[in-house]
Amino acid sequence: MSITVAIAYHSGYGHTARQAQAVAFGAASVPGVNAALHDIAALDEPLWRALADAEAIIFGTPTYMGSQSAVFQTFAEASGSIWAQQGWRDKIAAGFTTSAGVNGDKLNTLSSLAVFAAQHGMHWVSLGLPPGWLYTTNGDAEDLNRLGGFLGAMAQAPSDAGPDEAPTTGDLRTAEHLGRRVAQVTVELCHGRLVGVA
Ligand SMILES: Cc1cc2nc3c(=O)[nH]c(=O)nc-3n(C[C@H](O)[C@H](O)[C@H](O)COP(=O)(O)O)c2cc1C
């Protein structure tokens, strides 16, 4: 049985794209799972077909003006005809975002992605990591989940650093964790459906 986790993302300047690659790396580390990256700016038939065929979709967007990017919102609105058919109903979903500020209002972006997934009738998977870094005096900036999010994976990139420099290794490992967790949950759900318990 082949299971596909699609990573549907937008990135204006490359930082969220790096985060997306880390999510894909984590998802692909689970045996039996294919991870496929999709730039949602395309808005073409191959994109919609790939998302229809995936068992899970992980949504990613930079945080612009405290929420998802306009490009991501265009994609979300273009998915309205899929919503009308409930075409993504019961797929697994999760989300990630990058911003320049340490806080940067990333939670608002992740909340927006979770509501979007709920409108589609999808099952949202949280990050599932304790907070790191400044949560205790022993924390380190390279900790997993240094930004202390729960709804999805957060990453931070200084606005004058290129995508080859940021996000940090810890933020990218956090993104990998999300991809792996989503892939594991998707495998469990798909096997449960096969034997008739889900
Ligand atoms: C139009 C615009 C709005 C932004 N708004 C925010 C914001 O609300 N909070 C924040 O922390 N950073 C904000 N930023 C910074 C981006 O989130 C940051 O540069 C991020 O790394 C961009 O990701 P990308 O390279 O994938 O496009 C904004 C950047 C732009 C271009």
Image (cartoon, rainbow, N blue to C red):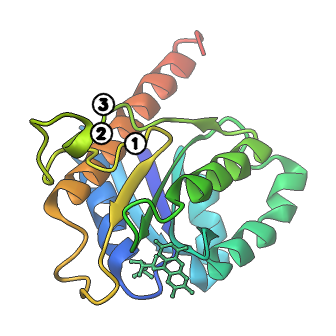
Q: Is residue 89 above or below residue 83?
A: above
For residue 106, side relative to residue 101 (left or right): right
Position of residue 149 measured from the top left corner of the image (x, y, whole percent): 42, 43
Residue of label 3: 130
Q: Position of residue 125 (x, y in %)?
A: 50, 35
Residue 83: quarter of image = bottom right
Residue 13's place in the image compared with 51, above or below, is below
Alpha carbon of mark 3 to alpha carbon of mark 2: how far? 27 Å
- The disc, 3 or 2, on the residue closer to the chain's N-terminal end is 2
Q: Amino acid at mark 1?
A: Ser
* Element on which disc 2 rests: loop
Q: Position of residue 101 (x, y in %)?
A: 40, 69
Work out whether residue 40 or residue 154 is closer to the camera in this orientation and state it. Answer: 154
Would you place residue 127 above or below residue 61 in this image?
Answer: above
At a point 73% along the width and 67% down the height, the residue shown is 76
> Is residue 176 in sight in this rendering?
yes
- Dots 2 and 1: beta carbons under 8 Å? yes
Residue that mark 2 sits on = 32
Looking at marks 3 and 1 on the same chain, the residue that comes earlier in the sequence is marked by: 1
Q: How many marks?
A: 3
Instruction: Specify few, some or many for label 3: CA neighbours under 10 Å numbering under 14, 14-19, or 20 or more.
Output: few
Q: Residue 2, labelled with which disc?
A: 1
Residue positioned 43% across, 59% down in the render:
103
- Front residue of 59/88: it is 59
- Occupied quadrant, residue 109: bottom right
What label sits on residue 22 in the rendered view? none
- The amino acid type found where label 3 is placed reads Pro
